[in-house]
Amino acid sequence: MDPHKIIKYPLSTEKSIRLMESQNKLIFVVEIDADKEVIKKAIEEMFKAKVDTVRTYIQNGEKRVYVKFSNETPAIDIATQLGLM
């Protein structure tokens, strides 16, 4: 499946910026029926980055994921690529 269909867009809220700086995490809104494995593969493929963990939650019919990147991949670099910084 195309990673661009799974990952809809990143969230750039105050909380997500704080998480990026303190815990090397980014928050994305994703396709509601995508599971953690599919999301992890899509993120790794899109950004050529190593992902440690993926945590999901659904709010208001929207699925969000907290993606923790490995130490060799700073989340701030990916945020810069996405134009969030």
Image (spheres, rainbow, N blue to C red):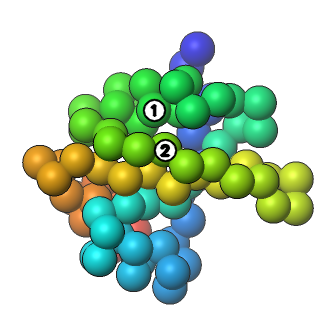
The kind of residue tagged 1 is Lys
Residue 40, image x, y percentages: 45, 32
Along the horizontal axis of the image, is 40 left or right of 78? Answer: right
Along the horizontal axis of the image, is 32 left or right of 66? Answer: right
Residue that numbered label 2 is attached to: 54
Tell which residue pokes out farthest to the left in this image. Answer: 72
Pointers 2 and 1 in contact (CB under 8 A)? yes
Secondary structure of the residue carrying tag 1 is helix
Task: Name the residue rendered at 29%, 77% in the picture.
Answer: 22
Q: Quadrant of residue 48?
A: top left
Residue 22's tag is none
Task: Name the residue rendered at 40%, 73% in the picture.
Answer: 19
Assign the C terminus to one quadrant of the image. Answer: bottom left
Disc 2 or 1, which lies upstream in sequence?
1
Total number of numbered labels?
A: 2
* Separation of residues labelled 2 and 1 (CA atoms): 7 Å
Assign the N terminus to one quadrant of the image. Answer: top right
The kind of residue tagged 2 is Val
Task: Name the residue rendered at 32%, 42% in the picture.
Answer: 52
Residue that numbered label 1 is attached to: 40
Residue 72, image x, y percentages: 11, 48
Residue 35, image x, y percentages: 64, 29
Along the horizontal axis of the image, is 16 left or right of 20? Answer: right
Residue 76, image x, y percentages: 25, 65
Seen in the picture, residue 71 relative to 49 is either above or below; the reply is below
